[in-house]
Each structure stands twice: as C-alpha cells, then as structure tokens.
Amino acid sequence: MATDRARPRGEAEVPRSPSRPGRVRIARKGSPAGRACLYLLLFLGAFVAVMPFLFMASTSLKTIAETITRVSPIPFHPDFWPASPQWVNYIFAWTRARFGLYFRNSVLTAALTVAGVLFTSSLAAYAFAKIRFFGSKVLFAVLLATLIIPESVYLVPNFITITRLGWYDRLAGLTVPFMASAFYIFLLRQFFAQLPTELLESSRIDGAGHVRSFLSIMLPLSHAPLFTVAFLAFIGSWNSLQWPLVATSSPRWRPITVGLTTFITDAGPENQLRMAGAMIAVLPVLLLYFVAQKQFTEAIARSGIKG
Amino acid sequence: MSTPSRTVRVRSSGRAVHDTLTAYLFILPSLAVIGVFGIFPLFFTLYVSLFKWRPGGKVAFLGLGNYAEIFGKDALPLLAVLASIAGFVLAGLLIRRRRSRAGGLLLAAGLIVLAASLVALAFFLPALVAHGDKEIFDALRVTVWYSIGTVPLQLAAGMLLAVALSRRMRGQQAFRVVYLLPYISPAVASAAVFELLFSLRPDSFANQLLLLFGGKPLQWLQEPKGIIPLIFGAVPRAAGVGVVPSYWLQWAQGPSLALMSIIFYSLWVFIGYYALIYLNGLSAIPRQLYEAAEVDGAGRIRRFFSITVPLLSPTTYFLTLLGVIGTFKAFTHIYVLRHPAASGTVDPLSVSIFFTFFRKARLGYASAMSILLFAIVVGLAILQQRTLEKGVSYGD
C-alpha cells in the first residue's frame, strides 16, 4: 500500500479545522482562487450535462421552419429558443404520432415488471440471506454468473421461446422475461444479510414461520433497498429498446422507446416532433428523479451496475 | 422473549429439511424466470447455432457450417490465431513468475513467447479475416476502438470529477443530481438529440463549435473515414500491397469520425455515473490518511497519486470490468446514432448480431455470432480477474 511518506517538515502549517462527522471530505478549503476555479469547472461540467436537454426542450417548441433557420449552439443566444413556444407540437406528438398510446404501454410494462421484480427478488434474497439450505452457495454463484451475459445473446433463443409460448407482440412477452434478475437478488441479499439474524430468530421461537418473519419483519425494515430495486427496475424497463424491438410487431404494446426510434426513422425532417416525443419519453424519468433525487443518487451509487 | 439465539441453530434434521424446502419455495419464482429466460437460452442458442434457422419453422441442420462462415473454411489461420492468444496467456504467466529463483530464464522465455505470439498474430489475423466474414471482423475492430475510446477516459475523468465533488461545498448534492442526468434518462431520447447536435449540417452544434475555433464543417455521424487521415491527411492507400500490410493499414486509420461522435455520446452519459461510483469509494478512505500525509508535507498532487488512486483501485477494477463488458453490450445509442453512410464503421458485434437476426432473419447465424460474443466476454472477464485483480489494493 502506498504510504511512502515524505520526511515531516518543520513548517507543517496545519491548523486543524473541526470537521463535521459523517461527511465525505477529502481536502480542506483551498484558496479562494482555487475554489473559484473548482466551481467554474463544475459549472462547466454541469452545463455540458444539461445542454442537450435544453436543446431537446427548445427544439420541441419550435416551428418546423425555425428548426432549420433559427438555430444557435449557445443557450444564452435568443436563436437557441423559439420565437414563440409551439405547445401544439406536443399535441401532435401525443395524438398523431401516437405517443399517448406508447406512453401508456411503457407505463404498464414498467409497472408490471417492477411488481414482478419486487416479488421474486425479495423472496429469493431472503432465502439466500437468512435460510441455510442445501446448494445455496452453488445456486447463488450460478445466478450471479448470468450477469455478464450480453443481452444480444438472448435475442434469438428468447424470441423463439416467446413465439412458442404465444407471447409474441403481447404484454407478457415484454414483461415476464424481466421479472427476475440475479442483480436485484444480489442487491437485496446484501442488505438483508446485514440485518441481525437474532431479530428473526426470536420471532421464530415465538412460532412464526419464514413467511411471517419475511412479511412482518424483513420487508418493513427494507424500504430503502426495495426502493432502490424498484427504481432501477423501472429505469431498466422504461429505457429498454432492443428486446421490445424484437418482441413487438404492432403499435398495440409498443413502448415509447420503440415508438421514438421508428418515428425517428420515419418522420424525416420533422425534428420538432421528434424532440417533443423525446421530451415525452424523458419527462416521467426526470420527474421521478427530481422528486426523490437523494434516494436516487444513493441508489445508483449503491447499485454499481446497469445493463 | 430473551432466549439465546444459539438454541435455534441446533436443529433437528426435520427442521433442516423443512428449511430447505421453504428456501426453494422462496427461490422458485426467480429460478423459474431466470432459468427459462436467462440460463436455458445459453444452451438453446448453442443448439440453434448448428442450424440454418429461419422464422416460421424452416430449419436445416448445418453442423458447424455457421462457424465455418464466420471464420472461413480454412482452419489454419483460426488455429494459428488461437495459438497466439494462448501464447499471450503463457507469456503472461511466465513473466509474472520472474521474481522466483529461475527468474531470469523465465523472463527471457516469456519475452520470446510474447514476441512469437505477436508475430504469429500479425501474420495470421489478416489471413483469418480474409477468409472469414468481413462484417463480423469489422464489428470486432469497432468494438476494440470503442473500448479504447471510452473506458480509460471515463475512468480518469470520473475519478477527477469525484475528487472535485467530494469537497465540502455549497450545492454538492445539486451537482451530483445534474451529473447523473445523462445516465438516468432514456438513451433513445438523448441519443436523438446527439443525432441533431452532431449532424453534418453546417449549423449543427458540433460544426458551429468547430467554426468558433476556425475549423471547417465535418460530416460527424455520417463520416466513415478514420480520424487519423482526417487529422493528418491521407494514410497510404491499401491498393496493391499484400493482405497483411493492407489489413494493418486499416487499423492505422483509427476509429471513424462517426464512431468518435458515438464515443463522445458515451462519455457524456457515463462520466457522471463513474464519478458517483468513485465518490462512493472515496467515502470509504479514512480521512486520517490524508491528514497524516499532509503533516508529512505531501502536496495535493502527491496525496492524490499516493493515497486516492491506489485506495480507489477496487472501484477502478470494478468499473473497468463494467466498462469493457459494457462495450460488448452497447446497443441502444448506437442503434439510434448509426447512419447508413457510416455503416461498417460504427456497429459493434452486439449491433451486428441484432441486424443479422432482425433484418436478415438468419437466426442460426446470429446464434453462432452470439456464441462468439459470449466466448469473448467470458474470456475477458477471466483475463481481467487474473490480471487486474493482482494490482488491486483493498486498503490493508
């Protein structure tokens, strides 16, 4: 490990400032100029992160002529924005481009998937964390190994499977294959394993079975990780494109991601409608994100993986 | 009730059987879904890869025919390439043992094996590509460029950003929220924006920016030319030279500008995410280490390289694995950003598999490609586990 220390110098000028406990803090306050530089850089980064969304919003409110004639790369320039916002674009996108239907499909698909994931993975995580049983280690390792498999590998076999099951172009074909994942089991198991076993055992002495201790002790204590899993499963379902492209053939259950890509290739130059569609796809995610941003940033930090 | 918990652990065998049954009942739903849609498909795809398989039940047994189409009918180049890969592994093993008693000898042997493998690869890979499916080997080259273009930059920028964000300051949480936006939002939507930002129109964002610095408009997402000839003028054309040099000249062109544009998008999406994961790792580093180093007179840069970087190595290892394997999974944004004009220079293997199945309806061939992809990913995972994990410090 790297502790090759330099010789202590006499002029160690460190007046120790009291630090608030429990907060990440590496370096102490630098010079005002250094701080200003830091802020400038961070703001520049934030600007880069946000700019495409501003572009999306502004273009979605332009007229088709403005998307060609009234353009500027800088959000502070008036030409970046429309002369007067065309809210009618959203009505067009919602009805004529059928984004209303796609939106509903995406909501349904995501809701069903999240419900399925919560059900399957919390049960399995409980078993792996709190019950000793034959084969648990091997089984868990096999499940985890499935995580490195790229989705492309699943395309052909799962397409054949859902076709045989009669789930092609049906809601079941879009949801059931994603109703369990080793990753969510893993996340929940990590949390469940931390909860003291004594808690469960005392209740079991009282005569409660595993089902009771799962429902009345484990779940009520696990709001945060369950939320993490629900959020990640929602994002995964809402943003997925490859499988829905393969598993749907009609607009009936087509999710908004597929609607958006087919619209992108069909619509030609009507960029304002494409961007309105993109806004409709982004907004629910952003709304959720801003409402519970604290939990979300922590959830992502905890997760470490997404497809 | 305060019975000591020990008593519960002493169970009759009846209790153990009961527990096992309960556990399997709890796992059953997950196991059913993952079994049918996550484990069975691996074997099924292997089976399908042995057939000419069209939708609607038109099926004919081919044996290894699909694989022969990928690698060419001539087995020699394939065997030679496989042998040189084995050679790399062997060389790595030998060189790692250099500290042992016969160290000098082993090191020399390792270097010889390494050189021989390199030469073999340089000669036989072009032959393999010449006999095999050009599209697939193009896709593999794209995948390599894409990894090189994204992973190291994401790691470096993510780590620096994490260090900057870890300072105590106003608006810390707000910055985190903003930096995670690109990662959270649907790639279909944000990639659609990038398609406009990097379009070939002279008034597109990328071209306007170029204009500010006195450049000329470029084709961006529709430019199949490599960035090396675009920056330095022409690389000598491949006409008339043999198979081997002309193959390596293709590499010398670098990634296409179209692929570079896609790499920019990737960086935009992932740097914030990497920073957040690094931030999580930073919070585990004890503050006392920094204070001690500061007392000892280590400057900020010294502290960064001697404390932060080594102690973050588990996170770096994890993110490298995630990033490289992610390259082989990349799909959505490339599907949106790929343009016919740049075809063949932007599709990694995952996208190529998708179109073999989706457009050409060649299920058997797509399955054989999937098996190849799977083998590569597993190989990489093992390799990374063996090599990188050695250099990882877990902080003790």
Image: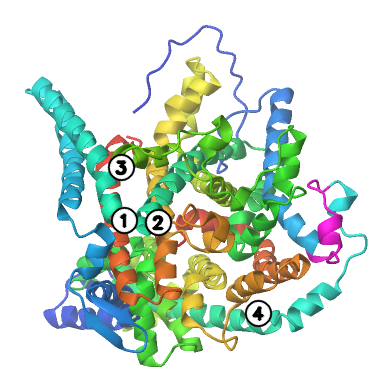
Distance from Cα at disc 3 to Cα at disc 1? 28 Å
Distance from Cα at disc 3 to Cα at disc 2? 28 Å
- Name the residue type under label 3: Val
- Name the residue type under label 2: Phe
User: What range is drawn magenta here?
Assistant: A60-75
**Chain at numbered mark 4:** A
Q: Which mark is residue A251?
A: none
Task: State which mark lies toward you, 1 or 4.
Answer: 1
Residue highlighted by disc 2: B328
Q: Which residue is rendered at x = 49% and y = 68% of the image?
A: A229
Observer able to see residue A219:
yes
Tell me, yes or no, whether the two marked residues, 3 and 2, touch with CB atoms within 8 Å: no
- Name the residue type under label 4: Phe
* The N terminus of chain A, quarter of image: top left
Residue highlighted by disc 1: B377
Observer able to see residue A206:
no
Q: Nearer the viewer, residue A44 or A298?
A: A44
Residue furthest to the top = A10
**Chain at numbered mark 3:** B
Residue highlighted by disc 3: B243
Labels 4 and 2 within one chain: no
Distance from Cα at disc 4 to Cα at disc 3? 52 Å
Structural crowding at the residue carrying mark 3, measured as other residues with C-alpha within 10 Å and reported as few (<14), some (14–19) or many (≥20): some
Q: Position of residue B233 (x, y in %)?
A: 56, 32
Residue highlighted by disc 4: A103
Tell me, yes or no, whether the two marked residues, 2 and 1, touch with CB atoms within 8 Å: yes
Distance from Cα at disc 2 to Cα at disc 1? 7 Å
Labels 2 and 1 within one chain: yes
Tell whether position B192 is magenta. no
Q: Which residue is rendered at x = 11% and y = 27% of the image?
A: B109
